[in-house]
Amino acid sequence: MLDPEGKFNNPKVFGLIGNLVDLGVWRYNVERDYLEWDAVMFDIYGLKRETFKNQFSDWRDIVHPEDVKGAEASFQESIKTNGQFVYTFRIIRKDSQIRFIKANAQISEVNEKGERIIIGANQDVTEILSIKEDREELLQTLEDSQRTARIGSWQYYPKTQTSVLDEVTKAIYGLPADYEIDAAEGITYYKEGYSRDTIIQAFTELLEDKKPYDLELELITAQGKTVWVRTIGRPILNSDGEVFKAVGVFQDITHLKERERALSESNLRFQGAFDYSAIGMAIVSLQGRWLQVNRRLAQFLGYSEKELLNLTFQDITHPQDLNKDLELVQACINGEIEHYQMDKRYIHKNGEALWAILSVALIRDKDQEPLYFISQIEDINERKKFERDLVEANEGLQKLSNRLSLQNQSLNDFAHITSHNLRAPVANLKLLGELYQNSNDPNYKDELFAMVQKSTHDLLDTLDSLVDSLIIKNKSGMDMQDVNLKDAVNTVLKKMTSVTSSTEAKVELQIKLDLIYAQPLYLESILSNLLSNAIKYKHPQRRPEIKLSAYLDGNRPTITVEDNGLGIDLKRHGAKVFGLQKTFHKNSDAKGVGLFMVKTHMEAMGGEVSLESTPNEGSKFILQFKAQYK
């Protein structure tokens, strides 16, 4: 293979070796400082053959500065001792990559010139070291995880009855790491009774029947502390199908058991509160189906628990309350609100509407995904009934108050009407009495007496009318009826004949209504007041002219009384025209009662009165009655 110069006489050897073992092969003549590399070496070091000077410095210059000294010293030591050179170092390639190189070389021979020839190989072990490092890190992580999770391992060899426990398993037992324990002693740490009996049976079946086990049992540690452990065992069989080794995992699950117990207790408390709650409770799906209901809810709604579980809350919610409930449900699912409360009506199995306070909370999982609703349904039928009764009582009290107020007003009206309507007849009787006493003429006295009788009769009629009016006003409802309007107007005018004649008053009637729905006495009082006022407050320089019209204004019966009298300055007196004892002229007999009574009577019948007036030109009273004209 070597020529007289100490060189390879077959260059293909380099490539052959490199291809077979993925190694770069090199040869170095120590005395002549001549270095040769094969193609793999150039690939490993990232150098080009044309830039290679075949000197030791070509290799040294590319070695990592921190590793040059150690690598060169090891190489030189090998030359001095003719020993083997094995060293791992780093190089920095021209492309700036740092690679780990494992070098192996030895002095091969001394040529005929006495020159020492060293032949060696280089291998890029960067990936191998990386894998080893990752493996070590993984093993360390696994070991740390086992310690953190309190997971140990064990092995048992049946033939020698040898037990091997790792440090974590010993720590769970409460034993030091250097303590040696056999299988028989290990079993004694299990709590007497169920736990110890169970592990003995399971371990026996593993060895004899090759049956694996996975158990959760109680253990008493060396310190006397009770812990829960999960012990897993499985058999390892030899080629003859015999158990030559048992292996397993040993984990401290005390905290898991405590959490399970706490959760179980919590569930029991919740279930107890759920089942025996004084109000209805339910677990409801996101779609509204009853998933679980308590007895109180079933009783409230009149269904059996089984019947309710076949329904949705939508099925038994009052239609008028359903949309609001569904909107709040969707708001919970969307995360806009966490819970809600509302008064709503459910439909009992018998069809009756039942009032309840509904309180709803949405339950989510650890990822905040909605799971189901917990609903509380409190029966408030009695409260709602009480509220209705209270409202009705308040309405009754209000009606009573209004009635009392109306009666008081009626008494006041009666007093004012009496004062107003009886003053003239009484004064007339007084005058007739004085005339009768001062007269000596028997014939004249007879005439005066007849006049007194007539005035007394008229006064009695007036009193009867007033009393009837008061009785009507005090009744629960006005004695409204269809009144022949023309007859009512003629009756009033007939009573006013002497007044209209003495003043030469002209009364024009334009009545286009046959009937008007009113209280007869009130209507007569209104017409009497307005017609007499038209004459009483006539213009001193004009003959009184009165126009009474009746017609339909839309669907409202309307009466107007228009005169050419003194009129009223509405800019000054408009706000108090219809006030009690308000007068606007200097007439000595003006008492300020008539217009007040007109307004009072109109409002009592559900109508209204208004006035249009110009001083010294006249007035126009407009009476609008309720739209109940038949």
Image (cartoon, helix red, strand yellow):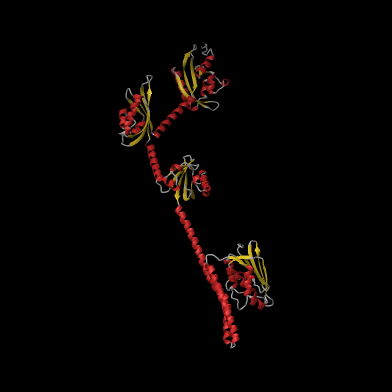
Does 111 sit above or below residue 599? Answer: above
Query: Which x, y percent locates residue 250?
Result: 37, 31
Choose top left, top right, bottom left or bottom right for residue 273: top left
Query: Which x, y percent locates residue 198?
Result: 33, 31
Side (left or right) of 270 relative to 24: left
User: In this view of the protein, can residue 557 be seen by the observer?
Assistant: yes
Q: How many marks?
A: 0
Residue situated in front as seen by the camera: 578 or 423: 423
- The residue at the point 60 percent across, 85 percent down is 444
Does 149 sit above or below residue 465? Answer: above
Residue situated in front as seen by the camera: 621 or 85: 621
Q: Check the image and name the residue furthest to the right.
A: 542
User: In this view of the protein, can residue 431 be seen by the observer?
Assistant: no
Q: Quadrant of the C terminus?
A: bottom right
Query: Which x, y percent locates residue 521?
Result: 58, 70
Does 300 sit above or below residue 447? Answer: above
Residue situated in front as seen by the camera: 40 or 173: 173
Residue situated in front as seen by the camera: 457 or 317: 457
Side (left or right) of 318 relative to 540: left
